[in-house]
Image (cartoon, helix red, strand yellow):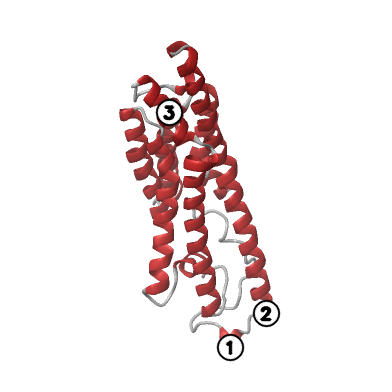
Amino acid sequence: MKLLIDFFPIILFFIAYKLSGIYVATITAIIAALAQVAWLRWRHGSVEKMPLITLALILVFGGLTLLLRDPIFVMWKPTIVNWLFAGAFLGTSLVGKRPLVERMMGQAVSLPAPIWRRLNWAWVLFFLISGLANLFVVYIGSGFYAAEQALIAATAITAIDLNSCADQFIGQPLLLCETAHESEAVWVNFKLFGMMGLTILFVIGQAFYLARHFQDADPADLDPGQSEPAQDPLAATSGDIR
């Protein structure tokens, strides 16, 4: 349930894009992120930092996309989010006694300190790879950036709505616009299915890792002050990260 709430703006972004294009989708994502934060505030009385950071970034990068009519800004947002989270997990690995993943999950799972540190480093690596994967799709995998630049070079127009190519161009510029639109759609599909799939696979892998060490944990190896292991080691793993 919490994972679904975390991906709520992304799902609405995908639906809006399929119906009306990148700019309507960006507006929809901004509204959805605002609604998400408002709901969390109403439901829990407070909002964690991560939804607030995500909201701030979609306001900035989504706003730039709408203002400059260039999708590249909103395409960078997932990478910035992932790398900020990687920095947060990395910082707690280097400074302080308890890494961030232990602070998030320590009430549900009791594990030796070295296991927490390994798990925290795994999250750092995951967020770094996720950010790089997004940029790979934008610049290489989908070919969007090259297609967009070719279209701009051919038309000398920087603010182009790729959702209405036939209304703006004919001939070669039309073909370039359609190519850029198809490339843009590849990224949108990756943003939903690729990023969500990577997250789900990583959380499943984390669950198996936790279950193995949960079974093998010796109470004498646990950090002082921790209670006995909780009955459900998966209780806190699903949604706080994204």
Q: CA distance from mark 2 to mark 1?
A: 12 Å
Q: Which residue is mark 2?
A: 216
Q: Which residue is mark 3?
A: 150
Q: CA distance from mark 3 to mark 1?
A: 63 Å
The residue positioned 45% from the left and 18% from the top of the image is 173
- 1 and 21: which one is in front? 21
**x and y percentages locating residue 59 in the rendered image:** 34, 38
- Nearest-to-viewer mark from 2 and 1: 2
Residue 158 vertical position relative to residue 129 in the rendered view, above or below: above
SS class, disc 3: helix
* 30 relative to 234 in the view: left or right: left
**x and y percentages locating residue 10 in the rendered image:** 51, 39
Q: CA distance from mark 3 to mark 2?
A: 57 Å
Say if mark 3 contacts mark 1, CB within 8 Å.
no
Residue 48 vertical position relative to residue 18 in the rendered view, above or below: below
**x and y percentages locating residue 159 in the rendered image:** 35, 24
**x and y percentages locating residue 131 in the rendered image:** 47, 51
The residue positioned 48% from the left and 40% from the top of the image is 138
Q: What number is the disc on residue 220? A: 1
- 52 and 80: which one is in front? 80
Q: Residues within 10 Å of mark 1 (few under 14, many from 20)?
A: few
SS class, disc 1: helix
- Nearest-to-viewer mark from 3 and 1: 3
